[in-house]
Amino acid sequence: MVSDKPLLELKGVSKRFGAVQALTKVDFFSYPGQVMALVGDNGAGKSTLIKGIAGIYPFDEGEVYYDGKQVHIHSPKDCAALGIEIVYQDLALADNLDVVANMFLGRERVLPLWRLDEASMEKDCVKTLDSLSVTTLRSVRQPVASLSGGQRQAIAVAKAVMWNSQLVILDEPTAALGVAQTRQVLDLVRRLADKGLAVVLISHNLHDIFEVADRITVLRLGQKVREFDTKQTNQQEVVHAITAGQLEQVPGMVKS
Amino acid sequence: MSVENPTTAPESALLAGQAAQSPSEYLQGYLKRVTSGDLGSLPIILGLIIIAIVFQSQNQNFLTARNFVNLIVQMAGITTIAYGVVFVLLIGEIDLSIGYVSAVAAVTMTLLLREPGGWPWYAALGLALITVAIIGIVQGLIITSFQLPSFVVTLAGLLAWNGVVLIMIGGAGTVIIQDNVIIGIANYFLPPLWGWIVAAVFVGGYILFRIRQVIARRSQGLPTTPMLIVTVQSIGLAILAGIAVYVCNLDRGVPFVGIILLVFLVFFSFLATKTPFGRYVYAVGGNKEAARRAGISVQKIQVIVFMISSTMAGMGGIILASRLRSVDTAAGGGNLLLNAIAAAVIGGTSLFGGSGRVSSAILGALIIMSVENGMGLLGLSSGVKFVITGLVLLLAVLVDAISRRSRSQSGLA
Ligand SMILES: Nc1ncnc2c1ncn2[C@@H]1O[C@H](COP(=O)(O)OP(=O)(O)O)[C@@H](O)[C@H]1O
Ligand SMILES: [Mg+2]
């Protein structure tokens, strides 16, 4: 189900926080059925790029195209309405709410008289978690505060894929996980792409990236330095781009 | 497209873990929660028993029908204000203006009622409540638009509204309320039969709600509370309601204001736990950023909560004025503000946001007012009363902190 049209395309986006130029004229895209990895050193601007797409910190300049059409994302709601789901590095779960409440936060099902449809939400929450083999929870009615790091990450991923999303973005989803749980999340990432979703994966672990990603975009100091096809490169080349990357002569040009 | 739905695993591992609860398993689960520090309302109930024993042993008039009815009327004002406080605490903010905002509503209403040319009671009451609702909205907008601490903005409100009350009353000193409906709010008692009817409606409503909940969960194939437990809890509530009505009927009857407290309790509990709005209130208090990213308009929730807080303060002020049958320059002062906040906290609502229940308002107020009522019977000086009320608050916060710690140690926090 690999399409030749990008689902998401950013053209020359920039973002400034006061004196910090977090992103400078970055081009970026993501194809359906592919995992696009986004790598770069700490502070390279990866999270800022994601938050721009999410509408949390809208870009100062540049254009965003979704499914071929130009879009303007000003809030997380706009982003979700397009079919983009994001799993944040800082998990964005409310500790005091239970698993079901977190999975449906902001999109609760409502019955007449403005009542929450708890039973149907709980059922679909359980269904989704089962389908992702997240079975270590004692109960979906326990507060998220009582979960382990891996369980919390699993909830965050499950939350993103439960909606009919076309593009799932994961910001360092395995950073805090053990070996087995990392394995599970990577399998899940690959499965999402194989089902035809566009996936963007931010990670520091090149080993993980080479395992699941189809393409790799390298950011450095807020600029895009290279973009690789995973099959035609190796870890040394990518590390070099991350640490000492030169800008390509024609920004956005792809060598394939 | 999503990865789940079409192929539902017939046997969910998650559901299997929690399905098929028998009554004894349910009880074991409850005991486990309690022993691991999730005490719920137990400390309050224990506290009330201790209070009853201590004061009854000192003064035979404490546990009488007359005093029980008095207590309900005495606690009505701060309970009503405390309902609003619970919401403000849930979003992790504070509202120090509620004392004098309650007086603004009471004075506005009283002046509108004043003859000659007085307004009808519903118009006066309605305009008074709208006025304080707008005050809440304005304070909420100032806090959220300029990112100011609610502590400071509502402290300014405390001073300013105190001034407004003094200006409005002017030289009059005391303004008497002559409208019978308004006076009736805190001074009318239901005839015995009506007390029973109201109790039956409440208990019936509760049972209906529990049964509907079980049916809804069963229809989705989810584990349910065992019917035996639902039955026992319903009977328990029926007995409690029966005793309360019986005792009230031994004296003047069920106070009308007691019904008002119950209606608010049901309404705000519904709002907090059964509606998207309530869910967002807890989310904003638990993790503002998560709420924002979920697409919740955090500012809207905050402003509405400050509006609720002001409006309930106004309602409480009107109840207090009804009880006194007048307002004077002291309205909204004294320890009204601190008692209302203390009630919510003693009842178990956290000062740090995201945790608490609407019922904590009525439970905390019950503790505070029964201590105050008991000390009044013993004829203790105000100095002693304040010291003891302070100690009760400290004790409540300590119990909460200790149970929280044991909860986090057992991974339940
Ligand atoms: N909300 C913010 N306010 C100010 N500066 C920010 C903010 N978010 C990110 N930055 C700055 O932007 C740069 C890029 O940060 P970030 O996108 O988090 O990098 P990465 O995720 O690649 O580690 C950093 O210099 C960071 O300090
Ligand atoms: Mg980052």
Image (spheres, coloured by chain):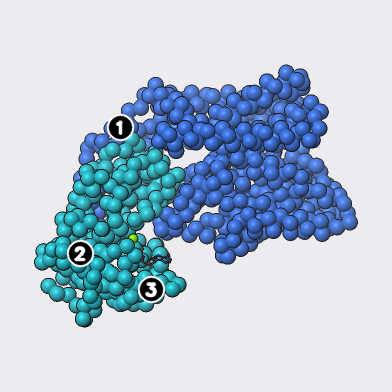
Chain colours: A cyan, B blue
Residue placed under numbered mark 3 in the picture: A21
The response on whether ligand 2 sits within 8 Å of label 1 is no
Q: On residue A239, which mark appears?
A: 2
Q: Residue at x 27, y 51 (%)?
A: A174
**Mark 1 element type:** helix
Where residue B362 sits: x, y (%)? Answer: 62, 37
Query: Farthest residue in the bottom direction?
Result: A250
**Mark 2 element type:** helix
Q: On residue B322, which mark appears?
A: none
Quadrant in which residue B218 is drawn: top left
Q: CA distance from mark 2 to mark 1?
A: 46 Å
Q: Are marks 2 and 1 on the same chain?
A: no
Residue placed under numbered mark 1 in the picture: B17
Where residue A29 sits: x, y (%)? Answer: 24, 70
Q: Residue at x 75, y 48 (%)?
A: B332
Q: Mark 3 or mark 2: which comes first in sequence?
A: 3
Say which of B112 and A53 sits in front.
A53
Looking at the rendered structure, the kind of residue marked 2 is: Val
Q: Residue at x 58, y 52 (%)?
A: B93
Residue A99 visible in rendering: yes
Say which of A147 and B85 sits in front.
A147
Where residue A70 sits: x, y (%)? Answer: 31, 75
Between tags 2 and 1, which lies in front?
A: 2
Where residue A117 sits: x, y (%)? Answer: 41, 45
